[in-house]
Image (spheres, grey):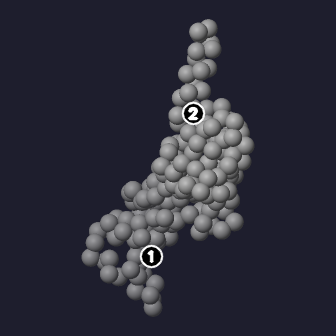
Amino acid sequence: MFYKTKLKDHVRVAPHRFGLPVKDALLQQLKSQYEGFISKEIGIVIDIIDVSDVDDGVIIPGDGAAYYNAEFTALIFKVTLQEVFLGKIRDITDFGAFVTLGPIEGMIHISQTMDDFVSFAKDKVLQGKQSNKTLKAGEKVRARMIAISFKDVANPKFGLTMRQPGLGKLEWVIEDLATTTKKKSGA
């Protein structure tokens, strides 16, 4: 999910930015420092939108840069367990599917792709044995977040499932919804 979040930091502004208005210099510095930053507590910083509150700067002898306490607004992407995402299959492997979910990528283990015995074909297709459902790169899916690991903060891992009602390839979800609606109406 995307969030606008207020953050505070003690920001170092290098001398080459001294010709700019203070807020512009801070915005440039914060963008270069934070965009793409990943943290378990904060999430993934997508963009620094605005600098809203700045204290007087301090120059530290021997450094030449100015330091400011600043409050700024960041656009954050933060993932939570059980959250449902729309995504696109980027790649299929013999152990599952990699799904692009906005600025992150998650992995759906082969056992979590559908309620069926699933096999992997050489042409990078996952296929259900009884249902004949197939999953290929480029297809849109709805999946639920079931595992989040920040063991390697620079490369967090996100595990997904599609083995619940309302999840799966969008075509499957639409078919299931139509079948359920038809049963409820008595047709």
| Residue identified by numbered label 2 | 172
- Give the number of callouts: 2
Q: Quadrant of the C terminus?
A: top right
Q: Residue lying farthest top?
A: 186
| Residue identified by numbered label 1 | 12
- How far across and down, in percent of the image, does residue 37 sit? 52, 65
Question: Mark 1, mark 2: which one is toward the viewer?
Answer: 2
- Rendered residue at 63%/44% (across/down): 127
- Rendered residue at 53%/29% (across/down): 174
- Rendered residue at 64%/52% (across/down): 120
Q: Secondary structure at mark 2?
A: helix
- How far across and down, in percent of the image, does residue 8 sit? 51, 62
- How far across and down, in percent of the image, does residue 2 sit? 50, 48
- Rendered residue at 57%/32% (across/down): 173
Q: Residue lying farthest front?
A: 122
Between residues 168 and 93, which one lies in front from this camera angle?
93
Badge 2 density bin: few <14, some 14–19, many ≥20, Cα 10 Å: some
Type of amino acid under label 1: Arg
In the rendered view, would you say 125 is above or below 71? Answer: above
N-terminal of the pair, mark 1 or mark 2, is 1
Badge 1 density bin: few <14, some 14–19, many ≥20, Cα 10 Å: some
- How far across and down, in percent of the image, does residue 175 sit? 56, 27
In the rendered view, would you say 156 is above or below 112? Answer: below
Using the rendered view, name the quadrant where residue 148 is placed.
bottom right
Q: With 69 as the anchor, is 122 left or right in this view?
A: right
Between residues 47 and 53, which one lies in front from this camera angle?
47
Q: Is residue 172 visible?
A: yes
Tell me the distance, in whole angstroms, between the alpha carbons under discs 1 and 2: 52 Å
Q: Indicate which disc residue 56 carries.
A: none
